[in-house]
Image (cartoon, rainbow, N blue to C red):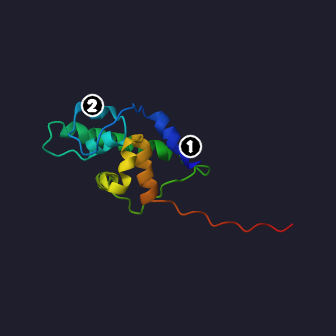
Amino acid sequence: MRRTAARLLLAAVAVLGGSTSARAALTEDNFYIRNAGDLVTLCAVSADDHLAREAIHFCHGFVSGAWQYYKSVNSGPTGEKLVCAPDPPPTRTQAIGLFVTWAKAPEHAGYLQDAAVDTLFRFLIETWPCPQPAAQPEKKR
């Protein structure tokens, strides 16, 4: 079921194929979000970059849209919760900063070529997993 939610998010977001490095200079091509590296490049933009304003707004919009879709799909009693944000939750800016740091870590470099929404939710699930329900004892017959 967890993969189903991620696939639904992927279907909701038009992700184009391609490659880029999270450490590459920001270009207009990054706005195509061909993979997680593009999203990380946008979200980690330097304030003095000529596209900084556009990049940070795009980053926040992408992340907010993915989160809102996740909440919509997983609302109600039948929704499978994959992410359980702490209370109080981090601000959007704080969460994006944590995502960028996580994505740039050497052990996560392989995820930069994956779909942006998949990598974003891999980070969220790893960072704020929901507690697993306690196993119910089997009923004796």
What's under tag 1, amino acid-wise?
Thr
Note whether residue 83 is visible. yes
Q: Position of residue 41 (x, y in %)?
A: 27, 43
Task: Locate the C terminus and report the quarter of the image it occupies.
Answer: bottom right
> Earlier along the polypeptide chain: callout 2 or callout 1?
1
Label 2: few (<14), some (14–19) or many (≥20) C-alpha neighbours in 10 Å: few
Seen as rendered, the residue at the extreme right is 141
Q: Position of residue 90 (x, y in %)?
A: 34, 58
Numbered tag placed on residue 72 in the rendering: none
Q: Tell whether 133 sits left or right of 83.
A: right
The residue identified by callout 2 is: 29
Q: Nearer the viewer, residue 51 or 90?
A: 51
What's under tag 2, amino acid-wise?
Asp
Instruction: For marks 2 and 1, give the CA distance.
Output: 29 Å
> Mark 1 falls on what kind of element?
helix
Q: Tell whether 4 sits left or right of 89.
A: right
Note whether residue 85 is visible. no
Which of the two marks, 2 or 1, is nearer to us in this view?
Answer: 2
For the point 39% across and 48% down, the residue is: 110
For the point 70% across and 66% down, the residue is: 136
The residue identified by callout 1 is: 4
In the rendered image, which quarter is residue 98 located in? bottom left
Q: Position of residue 100 (x, y in %)?
A: 30, 51
Question: Is 117 drawn above or below residue 28 in the view shown?
Answer: below
Q: Position of residue 31 (x, y in %)?
A: 29, 33
Give the number of marks.
2
In the rendered image, which quarter is residue 25 located in? top left
